[in-house]
Amino acid sequence: MSDATMIALPLLVPLVGLLLIVASGRVAALRDAVTVVTAATMFTAVLQLLPRVSAGERPRLELFEFFPGLGITFEVEPLGMVFALLASGLWIITAIYAIGYMRGAKEKHHTRFHAFFAVALFSATGIAFAGNMLTLFVFYEVLTLSTYPLVAHKGSEVAKRGARTYLGLLLGTSVGFLLMAILLTWWLAGTLDFTPGGIMAGTVDPAYGSILLVLFLYGIGKAALMPFHRWLPAAMVAPTPVSALLHAVAVVKAGVFTVLKVTVYLFGLDYLTELWTSDVMLYIAVFTLLTASLVALRQDNLKARLAYSTVSQLSYIVVGAMLVNSIAALGGSMHIVMHAFGKITLFFCAGAIYVATKKTEISDMDGLGRRMPFTYAAFFIGALCVIGIPPLGGVWSKWHLMSGAFDAGYGLVVIALMISTLLNIGYLIPPVVRGFLLPSKDGEETGMREAPLLCVLPLSLTALGCLILFVAAKPLAELLSGMLVVPVP
Amino acid sequence: MLEHLPALQVAIALTAAPLVMMFGRATRLAWAVATLACWASLAVALMLFVQVADGSVISYEMGGWAPPWGIEYSIDAANAWVLVIIGLISAIVMPFARQSVEQEISESRTALFYSAFLLANAGLIGITVTADAFNIFVFFEISALASYALIAMGRDRRAILSSFQYLIMGTVGTTFLLIGIGFLYIMTGTLNLGDLAARLPEVSDTRTIRAAFGFIAVGISLKLALFPLHLWLPNAYTYAPSMVTVFLSATATKVAIYVLLRFVYTVFGFEFSFVELAMAWLLMPLAVLGIFIPSLVAVFQTNVKRLLAYSSVAQVGYMILGISFASALGLTASILHLFNHAITKAALFMAVGCLVYRLGGVSLTQLAGAGQRMPWTMAAFVVAGLSLIGIPLTAGFVTKWHLLQAALEGGLWPIAVFLLGTSLLAALYIWKVVEVAYFQEPENPDTAVSEAPLGMLIPTLVLTASTVVFGVFGNFTVASAQTAAAVLMGAAP
Amino acid sequence: MEWLGHYNYWVVVVLMMIGFYIVIAQGNLIKKLVGLNIFQTSVFVFFISLAYLEDGTAPIALEGVSEYSNPLPHVLILTAIVVGVALTAMGLALVVRVQETYGTIEEDEIHQQDDLH
């Protein structure tokens, strides 16, 4: 297959899937089958690219010119490869889960739901494969817009308010800061292509570069850096599959992915060290990381707690980028994957609990672990993965981050990361403990009352994924380190 | 035949107008003839556009009288661009109009309505092609008179009053223009734009010429609804029949802006307008206020037509802002926005026309649930709305990108920031509508409301699709706008 | 007293201001139209004055006459008068419709019935 078809295929599959989903909307079983098949096809299509990318190739597709010298261009590099694999792979599992959840929780408008899911995945892939910043921005905006109907799905006043916050913050930061940053970059550097080693060294005065960095990092609202993190908890009004795949994986990871992409391929790590704002942004990320953990401790709503935990974990990745050394950048990139598996498991569990018992508050969930052992076991594994305890994948990314911080001489950051790990334990473990050990509040019922199989199976799979990642971390790290190689001219 | 194209451009609509009137009650026939006339106009406009695309100029002597004695029609890349806008919008609004007009206009007046529409069309085309200052005034009045009649035919009785308001303000505007032209004539003894441009530099350092500039600028600003001279516009657009709003919003203000450009760049010249009179310092604050205040007002509107009308005033501000940068890039952005905003706003108003057709009105409460009941219409509204906000891959983004570039080129960082901020305001007022239409249950769920008829829906969708097409393939429009800007900045026509 | 020599221009200015004032200040729609007409007429006078040449005569080729008034402004104003008449007719037609629908042509009384922003 040529480069063009190999790249176009993963982008086209969800769009074709979208049409089929809409067309088969009246027959529920068919539509749900189409959704899963689309997800599987897309994953296969993305997988085709893997051998070439890991062999060091960079498949390219130039679609059309937007303005002279600036067009919609795709180029697959290791980081984007990993992100696309992650999003499309987890989509298969989420699609299965969503079918079980939407039926079990008796949600309405299934067709619209699955259709916009497909659009969201299409745009996530577009972000992953983007060859220049403008292409990335286009898909970034499409992702925001396509997830808006998913957040507002219920149509209730709360859902609409949440969706308004969601759209307002994401659109506001992207149009207000990110577009500005892109425009200035184009104006100063004369190109927006993602280039190994960056494009700014030698073209952009570090004084401007410092401002640009702030604009970029706050413009990428999806990375949820404080104080622009409010949209993420607000998005929790969405049905849980959305929270799981989009607001633990695709959307938020698109944010931090963009951060990494910008720092590695636009600024370049060497240039970044010259900017005084990189330290400022580092400490803002550290602040976000700690504060969000503290807020998460106080949340009684399970999904809200997970959301704040996500805000905190995203900042790990931003910290990875802002530490400006290759080990930390690698750790940050690995954390995209590790956290994705851990957090999606946690969300699946929260959704399964809701489907089985209609409970959303942690204080109501005492004793539930004994009735839903599979769900709670998976929750435990997911929690350990997010915290970063062996033998789960999360340990590797945190290890890299800490050693990166240590190497760079940021002792304060190392301490902050340690404190944060303790906080992670503080807010993720109690739900499990309460579930297994405390007596149930509404009287003891005997026997298992698990969620539907279509919910339990996916969450078991992702929990298994967390375990496998512990072993598979090495090839992942090897693949990702390809992005830090700057070709010698 | 080919050399008579400039005359034909005006003549088609002008002769079709009385013809259409004669059909009386044969309304279908009247509509068909008017539609054909509009399509023919578009064909002529496109032929002219192709001929001057390389930056050349076609000069046509009306009746064989050589300028400056006779009236000259002159076509260059700048006004051919405007001709295409007028042609395109009228050609696409006519198929849309049949059902909309059948519902909104009584049968006995339908033929008269189309006749007036053609006159308005001819007037706008006339303003654009002519190279004679007094002729511009006459065509302004032809199109204005026809527009007053068209607006007054709106179903709401407030339409009459809005039309009267417009008549008073419009007439004051054109009379100012006439005074200015008079001053120019005293000093130079000519009315031909090219001649004026050649003779003005000798006498430009006089109070008379400065006064002429002032009168002309104010007069045209009234016609193009520059804030704060926009007061006639929201009412006129709100209460006019649907198709009239579509047509006027997309063409009338654009043509007025073109006339402003023609006077500022060709007649008075860049040097006089921007260096001596420092027009930029007058235009820029007005443009900034004119973007900000109407956008803010739009956010608080509950009638969607009115909301979009205020948005139109704000969009005029963007075009004026581009001019106020006093650079080729800024001018390009403005010319680009003439087209991009025309198709975007026309698509929006057409979607609104479809909604009016089925729901009877477009106050926000009436729109509840429209997303489910009229999915295609609302989809068109959303897409065109995104273009209005300036989301990438839509026509609106192409303009915004260039406008921002021009701001940065001029070192006007605060303006760039301001521009991005105001597109958020646009997002706010568009999203207000979207949210009600999609996520609010209709007030009376039992009454059946179906999708708009295909005759209205197809033109709406075509125009909406074009906002995406011209957003994706921005290269073509950008190149044309650059040529037009170069022609305006360069020598006289 | 040279400025008196241009007295016709002073008349133009005075007429213009009177017309403009009526348009703005009067609430009666007919009076507004009257004001508009005065306003326009002032411009017509202005144009005619432009054409005037001291000791000039009508632009007809006559033996022994070499100074003519400029005919072009006259022609222009003829057109402008036609336009003005059409505008007045249009305006009056609207006023008739206003009277039919509202029963009054006073602006404040209309605004009591209909809130036009």
Image (cartoon, coloured by chain):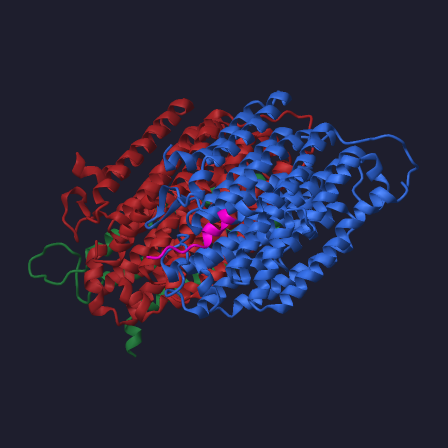
Chain colours: A blue, B red, C green
Of B138 and C47, the residue lying toward us:
B138
Q: Which residue is drawn at 16% across and 51% down?
A: B67
Report the side of A323 relative to B368 (left or right). left
- Residue C99 drawn in magenta: no
Q: Can residue B34 be seen in this view?
A: yes
Q: Is residue B240 visible?
A: no
Q: In this view, does B271 lie above or below A182?
A: below
Q: Is residue B361 above or below residue B320?
A: above
Viewport quadrant of the N terminus of chain A: top left
Give coordinates of residue A336: x percent, y percent: 58, 49
Q: In this view, does B383 lie above or below B328?
A: above
Q: Residue at x 61, y 47 (%)?
A: A338
* Residue range of the region highlighted in magenta in the rendering: A478-489
Residue A64, by quadrant, is: top left
Give coordinates of residue A391: x percent, y percent: 68, 47
Give coordinates of residue B460: x percent, y percent: 46, 33
Report the side of A276 relative to A156 (left or right). left
User: Hey, which residue is sitting farthest bottom in the picture?
Assistant: C1
Of B78 and A235, the residue lying toward us:
A235
Give coordinates of residue C92: x percent, y percent: 46, 44
User: Hey, which residue is sitting farthest left in the picture?
Assistant: C63
Viewport quadrant of the C terminus of chain A: bottom left
Q: Residue at x 62, y 25 (%)?
A: A32
- Residue A485 drawn in magenta: yes
Q: Residue at x 18, y 45 (%)?
A: B60
Q: Is residue C32 above or below residue C53?
A: above
Report the side of A12 relative to A290 (left or right). left
